[in-house]
Structure formats: structure tokens, C-alpha cells
Image (cartoon, rainbow, N blue to C red):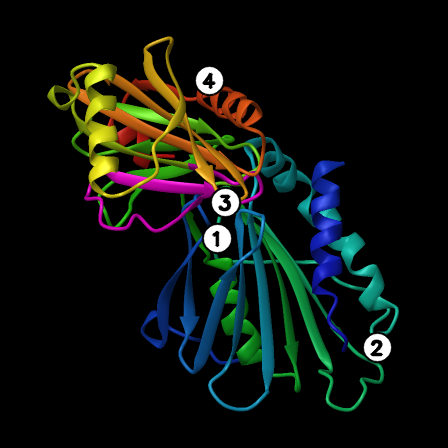
Amino acid sequence: MNPTRRHLAVVLFACLTAGRTTSAQDSVSKQYTIPNHGRLTLSVPAGMVDASRPITGQAGVELHVGPKAGKDFDLQVTAVWLDADKVARGRVSLREAMKQSAAGPLAQSVETEAKILELGGSPSPGYFYSLTDKAPPPGEFKYLTQGALVTGEIMATFTLLQQRPDEGQKTAILRMLGAAKYSNAAFASEEGVQFRSRDGVLEITHPSSRLSMTIPDPDHGFRKTSSGGDGPRYFRFEDTSTATIVSGWFEPAPGFSNIQKFWKDETAEAKRNGLPAAVNVEFMDAGAWKIVAYDLPLPLGVASHLRAHWVEAGTWIDIHLSNSGMPAAQGRTALRARLSGFKVAPKEPASALSSR
């Protein structure tokens, strides 16, 4: 049967916006990262292999599970993070959405009705249907099972294709999907800085700090990139759609005295390293932020930069914002607009963070 996995996902998300058993010992727990939104955990049955990749431009992951050898079956899963409103609507409309998604495959199936069955194994809602192709082309799969589930802040759609009606195989896979678990607890990067994305913002902190900072990220454009060798308090995120980089440090407050001394030290370090001199240097305040703005010449234009500093509760937050590809004045205005959305507040207790 020609899979209609993408049709299934389109229908579901449109609705939102409008015989062999496998024991725990026969499976391997696998975690799949939802970029900036936590992890999805599945217990993959023994004898199966898995692969995953993030979805470009979206907070989600695509999974592929198959046999270790041969082409007996093919399972594809698309798991996408949703905001609270869409999750709530998904829990209510999921069964009806499944009925709509079955209309296309049903037209070429032996069955005259697609029975929508409940996906067991989890308190989160999940449904599926199974159909048999009337006349699959050579090399195509004959048996189709499609479904969807909601777990936490994740909606996952799946398509299972089989060469033969192996109920034990299908049962093991459905059990794996029904037991899917999602966690959005704050998680530490390899450098020690903690970050997570929720409710349209990217939240960043460090275990030693009493402060937490949030950055507006409604389109989930920011992606964590290499932190290089700048130490355990450093972080770096990049939004390639706007050529904007946000990096910085959570440091002890005594490390910062005033913006003029900071800039004097920075320019001296740049000169020692043979870096080009900054131009159009401007000092300014924005609320509690102490800022120095400057430009760096590029072979084909200019890069705009802001260094912003917030000192409170024993913590010095040092932010470096930069962009390129636009006139200097426009670039600086865009960076100031970005910074205006940054919020710094006392950190929530660890128990509150981990419970979300």
C-alpha cells in the first residue's frame, strides 16, 4: 500500500488549528530529542533498529523503525511539539481527526470500513486503524496501520507498513507507541548551562545562578550551536532565518564593575588578537541592561553587535547579540528590538521546573 503518512499528519494538524508479547526485558529504552522542547522516550522492541532526525524549521523529530534484516515492515513516526491550546484541542478532536484521515486509504482497501481503535498502554489519548490494500503494486506493502497519539506536549502520528499480517509484530509496535513518554523538564547542556523552550520563549539559566532569563522564540527558530571552548557558563543559540546569534555567560556578579571598563578590556583583547577595530560605538541603557553597541566591518557589508549586561542577585548575565546582512542602522535596531523582549527574573524552584 502506498503510504499516506504525510496526508495523515496534514489532516490531524488541520483539525487542531480549525499474537507475540514483548516484555520490558525484550526492549531497549530510547530517547529522542525534540529540539529545545525536551525528549520523547520509546521502548523499542528487540530485533528492531531505529533512526531519527530533527524536523527542519519545526520543533519535532522524525523516527524510522525497521527490522534488523530484511524488509518485513516499516514504521515511520512524526512527533511534533504543540502549544498548550493545540494540545488541549488535540485531546478532544483526535478520534474524529483519525476518521477523516482514513478516508483516502479506505478507498483502495479490502475493508469497507476503517474501525478506529483505541491505542492502549497510556493515559494519554491515542487511536489507530488497520487496512489491507486490494492490489498493491510489486514491492509495495499490503498491510497498513496508521494512528496518532498525544503525550504531554507532543502529538505523534505514525504509519506502520507490513508485508504480511503479523499480529504479534503489530501488537509489539502498538504497545511501544502506546507507552510513549514525553518529558519537558529543564535539561543541562554539556557545558552546564540549562535551557528549555516553552510557551514561545527560550529559557536559560545556570545551576549556580539565582536568576533565569527568557528570550522570545515564538517560531522556535533558535537552535543551540557549538559553545566552543568558552567554559561551563557559556551558551550560544542561532536563528538562521534572521542571521541572528545570541550567546553569553552566567558569571558571578563581582566580575563586572561598569560598562566602560568592560569595553576597555574587550577592545584591548581584540587588538591583541589582531581583530578588526569596532566602529560606531555607542553606550546606552535599557532598563537594567547596560549596553555597548558597535559594528564590525565585513568584506561585503557590516555585522551589528550588542553587548548587554545585567547584574542582580549575585549573578552577572553577559549577552552578546549579533546579526549581519543588513545596513548597520537597521541591524542595530533589530538587535535592540530583540533585546527588549529578554526577561530576567528570580529562578523558579527546581521542583517547579521539573514538574512541567
Residue at 48%, 53% (x, y): give it.
122
Q: In this view, does 148 lie above or below 301?
A: below
Q: Say what secondary structure mark 4 lies in.
A: helix
The answer to which of marks 2 and 1 sits earlier in the sequence is: 2
Using the image as rendered, state which of residue 7 and residue 110 is in the foreground: 7
Q: In this view, does 37 lie above or below 322?
A: below
What span is in magenta? Answer: 223-245
Is residue 250 visible in the rendered image? The answer is yes
Q: In this view, does 287 lie above or below 343?
A: above
Q: In this view, does 105 lie to the left or right of 254?
A: right
Q: Which amino acid does label 2 sit on?
A: Val
Tell me, for residue 299, which label it has, or none. 3
Measured from the top left, where is residue 117 in percent x and y?
Answer: 66, 59
**Which residue is disc 1 drawn over?**
122
**Nearer to us: label 4 or label 1:** 4
Q: Say what secondary structure mark 3 lies in.
A: loop
Q: How far apart are marks 2 and 1 (CA)?
A: 30 Å
Q: In which quarter of the image is residue 22?
A: bottom left
Q: Say what secondary structure mark 1 lies in.
A: loop
Q: Are marks 2 and 3 in contact (CB under 8 Å)?
A: no
**Which residue is disc 2 drawn over?**
110
Q: Do the residues labelled 1 and 3 touch (CB within 8 Å)?
A: no
Tell me, for residue 340, which label it has, or none. 4
**Nearer to us: label 4 or label 2:** 4
Q: Is residue 80 left or right of residue 252?
A: right
Q: Are marks 4 and 3 in contact (CB under 8 Å)?
A: no
